Image: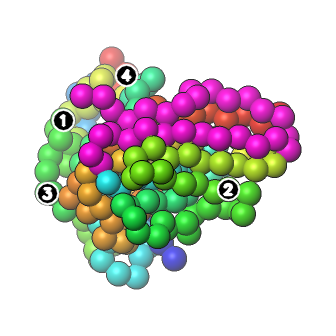
Amino acid sequence: AQRVTQPEKLLSVFKGAPVELKCNYSYSGSPELFWYVQYSRQRLQLLLRHISRESIKGFTADLNKGETSFHLKKPFAQEEDSAMYYCALSGTSYGKLTFGQGTILTVHP
Amino acid sequence: GAGVSQSPSNKVTEKGKDVELRCDPISGHTALYWYRQSLGQGLEFLIYFQGNSAPDKSGLPSDRFSAERTGGSVSTLTIQRTQQEDSAVYLCASSLAPDLMYTQYFGPGTRLTVL
């Protein structure tokens, strides 16, 4: 069975501080990992995916297979980063996603 | 261009009634997914359609749930004999092709409340 765990339901930081949203997964194979974001009153949207090795809006995520983690990081948080963040895993080739419970990030001015 | 659209945006129904939720994917997108977002369970996969292939129904929680996709475009999720635990936001997503390199674009969701 595959599972994604986001241990923090709520995370608060001040503007300009570093932020790390934790994500751990369990899967027997080699999954693909994603981060999705949902800003207030907006649709759920892809933030970044491991397969593309990309950095979006200053966020990066490194896959650590030894620790089965895919933590999302940003060195200097901005107020506009406040949102719900979901870590997701796909163990299939066609994008069926298993999501974590989500972390609400609040960046204070 | 237009994104994924869903209707209705909100649906309130009484326990035991049937409901139909509609999803219009982005034109040309062959892959379509349904997910459910609820307080207790977070975001859960329900069903996946790709072209004329048999759908992946592995996420449907019970046989009261069914979905179809007509003409490779519009999809309808039907919940029969609704229960209070069915209350959730039902999200539809589509992607250009069923490949991890293609982004899934989500609709705004249908908020279902079962009284």
For residue A17, above or below residue B60: above
Is residue A29 highlighted in magenta?
Answer: no
* Amino acid type indicated by mark 3: Arg
Q: Identify the secondary structure beneath mark 2.
A: strand
* Amino acid type indicated by mark 4: His
The residue labelled by disc 3 is A53
Tags 3 and 2 touching, CB below 8 Å: no
Q: Quadrant of residue A70?
A: bottom left
Label 2 CA crowd tier, 10 Å (few <14, some 14–19, many 20+): many
Query: Which residue is at a point 52% across and 50% down the rendered structure image?
Result: B35
* Amino acid type indicated by mark 1: Lys
The residue labelled by disc 1 is A57
Label 4 CA crowd tier, 10 Å (few <14, some 14–19, many 20+): some
The residue labelled by disc 2 is B65
Q: Identify the secondary structure beneath mark 4.
A: strand
The residue labelled by disc 4 is A108
Q: Which residues are magenta?
A: B1-29
Chain on which label 3 sits: A
Query: Which residue is at a point 30% across and 61% down the rendered structure image?
Result: B98
Is residue B2 highlighted in magenta?
Answer: yes
